Image (tube, rainbow, N blue to C red):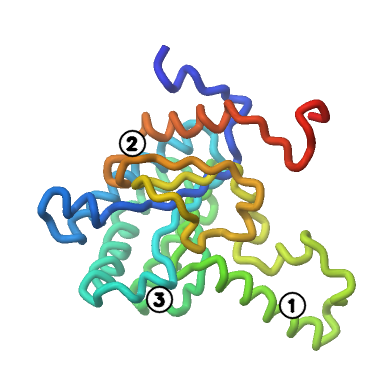
């Protein structure tokens, strides 16, 4: 039995989040510049996006660029922004053919003008697709998102639009960039690192974590299947006992 046949279709996670780590180290392994790794990482994005949609995942959120990534060498940052523009322009037709809607979270207006405009164009052109959402986390960090939400709540409280005494998890979530999107049931990180890197800190409170030992450019369909199978073998208790489930 191949890996795909081992997957239980009724237990596919609605939302899968991925930290796409290891592009630079993958390139170094082959004696190439880091940008070479990022370009090859695009191939993994394409394959995993189509694989997730094929399995019935409703939302796939990819950590594409963190707020901390601005601290990388300027040459690499510029190359990443150009690569994002080129990739979006090339992949829009494929997203439409596969009925996949593009979305993005993060402090998007701080992106370079050309990157921001191309991103918005892609979101607009795919807005009616409903098979799966491909959600890109760009200029994003979990701490930024939480602080940003708190600022909005404080302003709304000042304007008497919200009563702080009635603040609940559900109300708070409406102020997050992921408002309306279910929390990830599964978080995957590649490259063998075991940390969250400031990613979706509120949303992954009860996510199952899966760490793949391979670099992102090598992550393929079969590796995604392994992560889904591992997820389906776990007992998700949410604070309850096994007997209560």
Q: Between marks 1 and 2, how big is the CA–CA gap?
A: 41 Å
Q: Between marks 3 and 1, how big is the CA–CA gap?
A: 24 Å
Label 1, secondary structure: give it.
helix
The image shows residue 4 at horizontal and vertical percentages of 44, 22
The image shows residue 46 at horizontal and vertical percentages of 34, 44
Where 47 falls versus 75 (above or below)? above
The image shows residue 122 at horizontal and vertical percentages of 42, 61
Q: Please give the name of the residue rendered at 28% of the width and 40% of the height, measured from the top-left corner.
A: 218
Q: Quadrant of the N terminus?
A: top left
Q: Earlier in the sequence, mark 3 or mark 1?
A: 3
Q: In the displayed structure, does residue 231 sit left or right of residue 192?
A: right
Outermost residue, top direction? 1
Q: Please give the name of the residue rendered at 51% of the width and 63% of the height, measured from the top-left corner.
A: 198
The disc placed on residue 220 is 2
Residue in front for this viewpoint, 18 or 135? 18
Q: Please give the name of the residue rendered at 34% of the width and 47% of the height, measured from the top-left corner.
A: 191
* Residue 131 in view, yes or no: yes
Q: Between marks 2 and 3, how big is the CA–CA gap?
A: 29 Å
The image shows residue 38 at horizontal and vertical percentages of 26, 56
The disc placed on residue 153 is 1
Packing grade of label 1 (10 A; few <14, some 14-19, many >=20) is: many
Q: Earlier in the sequence, mark 2 or mark 3?
A: 3
Label 2, secondary structure: give it.
loop
Q: Are marks 2 and 3 in contact (CB under 8 Å)?
A: no
Where 77 falls versus 204 (above or below)? below
Packing grade of label 2 (10 A; few <14, some 14-19, many >=20) is: some
Instruction: Name the residue beneath numbered marker 3.
Output: 111
């Amino acid at each position: 039995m191949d890996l795909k046949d081992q997957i239980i279709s009724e237990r596919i996670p609605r939302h899968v989040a991925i930290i796409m780590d290891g592009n630079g180290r993958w390139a170094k392994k082959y004696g190439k510049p880091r940008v070479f790794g990022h370009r090859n990482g695009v191939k993994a994005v394409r394959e995993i996006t189509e694989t997730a949609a094929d399995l019935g995942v409703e939302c796939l959120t990819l950590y594409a660029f963190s707020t901390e990534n601005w601290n990388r060498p300027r040459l690499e940052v510029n190359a990443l922004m150009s690569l994002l523009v080129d990739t979006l322009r090339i992949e829009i037709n494929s997203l439409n053919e596969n009925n996949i809607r593009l979305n993005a979270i993060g402090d998007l207006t701080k992106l370079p003008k050309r990157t921001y405009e191309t991103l918005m164009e892609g979101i607009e052109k795919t807005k009616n697709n409903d098979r799966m959402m491909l959600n890109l986390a760009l200029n994003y960090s979990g701490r930024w998102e939480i602080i940003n939400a708190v600022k909005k709540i404080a302003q709304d409280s000042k304007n008497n639009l919200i009563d702080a005494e009635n603040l609940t998890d559900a109300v708070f979530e409406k102020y997050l960039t992921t408002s309306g999107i279910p929390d990830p049931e599964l978080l995957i990180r590649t490259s063998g690192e075991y940390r969250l890197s400031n990613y979706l800190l509120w949303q992954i409170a009860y996510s199952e974590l899966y760490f793949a030992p391979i670099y992102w450019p090598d992550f393929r369909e079969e590796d995604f299947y392994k992560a889904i199978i591992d997820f389906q073998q776990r007992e998700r208790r949410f604070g309850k006992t096994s007997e209560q489930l």
